[in-house]
Image (cartoon, rainbow, N blue to C red):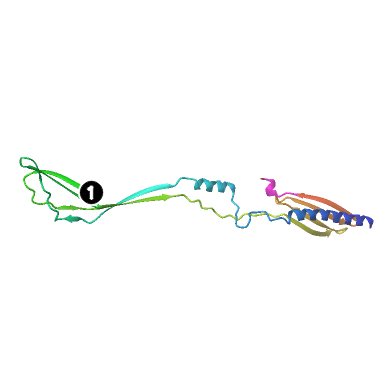
């Protein structure tokens, strides 16, 4: 009976220590990004930044649009300027929003007609800037928490009956630290358990 009492005190002491660990780790904020943020793999983030920093591609397109023919049939014949003998010089020009043209003509004799016509040309210049935009792909990632588990066991064989309890603490790296108590007849056995995730072990 005395040994059983000592065993109970030891179990309570161990449970108290583990409960303190639980209060320090399990009651803290859950690991992971704060609300409104997401986790991004560093390699993916570096790729996003590299694409975002690439200079944009620029393409310039020029569209030439001829306008309707403009006639100036009533434009008067300019006054000729004598040069020498029968040679005279005519000078004329058209200057407006769509054209700026002039002409110098030297002739011998008279000009009977002086009709102007032209097609105004409009150029549309368009600059197209293409920038590569990284498209992240959403992948669900498991976020582990610190946890404390308690469990009980019961069993035995044809000759003996056994019972006990386990108290396990799992940290963020999924490593397990635990205590086990097994009762077999009048004897009590205490075990310390240490476990590691196989995924982490073979990384």
Residue 44 inside the magenta-drawn segment: no
The image quadrant where one finds the N terminus is bottom right
- Residue at position x 53%, y 47% in the image: 49
**Which is nearer the eye, 93 or 23?**
93
The residue segment tinted magenta is 195-202
Instruction: Please tell me in which quadrant of the rendered image residue 157 appears.
Output: bottom right
Q: Position of residue 152 (x, y in %)?
A: 80, 59
* Number of marks present in the image shown: 1
Mark 1: give few (<14), some (14-19) or many (20+) Cα within 10 Å.
few
Q: Which residue is rendered at x = 86% and y = 53% of the image?
A: 189
Quadrant of image for the C terminus = top right
In the picture, measured across the screen, residue 170 lies left or right of residue 88, that is: right
Q: Residue 66: x and y, percent?
A: 25, 53
> Looking at this rendering, what residue extends furthest in the right direction?
2
Residue in view at x 85 percent, y 52 percent = 190
For label 1, the residue is 100
Which residue sits furthest top? Answer: 84
């Amino acid at each position: 009976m005395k040994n059983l009492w000592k065993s109970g005190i030891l179990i309570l002491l161990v449970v108290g220590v583990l409960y303190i660990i639980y209060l320090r780790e399990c009651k803290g904020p859950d690991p992971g990004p704060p609300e409104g943020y997401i986790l991004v793999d560093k390699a993916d983030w570096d790729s996003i930044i590299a694409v975002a920093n690439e200079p944009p591609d620029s393409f310039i397109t020029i569209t030439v649009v001829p306008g309707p023919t403009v006639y100036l049939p009533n434009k008067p014949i300019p006054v000729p300027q004598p040069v020498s003998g029968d040679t005279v010089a005519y000078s004329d020009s058209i200057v407006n929003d769509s054209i700026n043209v002039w002409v110098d003509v030297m002739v011998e004799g008279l000009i009977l007609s002086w009709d102007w016509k032209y097609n105004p040309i409009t150029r549309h210049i368009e600059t197209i800037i293409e920038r590569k935009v990284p498209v992240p792909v959403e992948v669900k990632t498991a976020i582990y928490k610190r946890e404390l588990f308690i469990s009980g066991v019961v069993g035995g064989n044809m000759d003996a009956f056994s019972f006990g309890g386990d108290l396990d603490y799992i940290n963020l790296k999924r490593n397990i630290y635990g205590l086990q108590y097994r009762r077999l007849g009048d004897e009590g056995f205490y075990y310390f358990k240490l476990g590691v995730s196989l995924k982490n072990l073979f990384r």
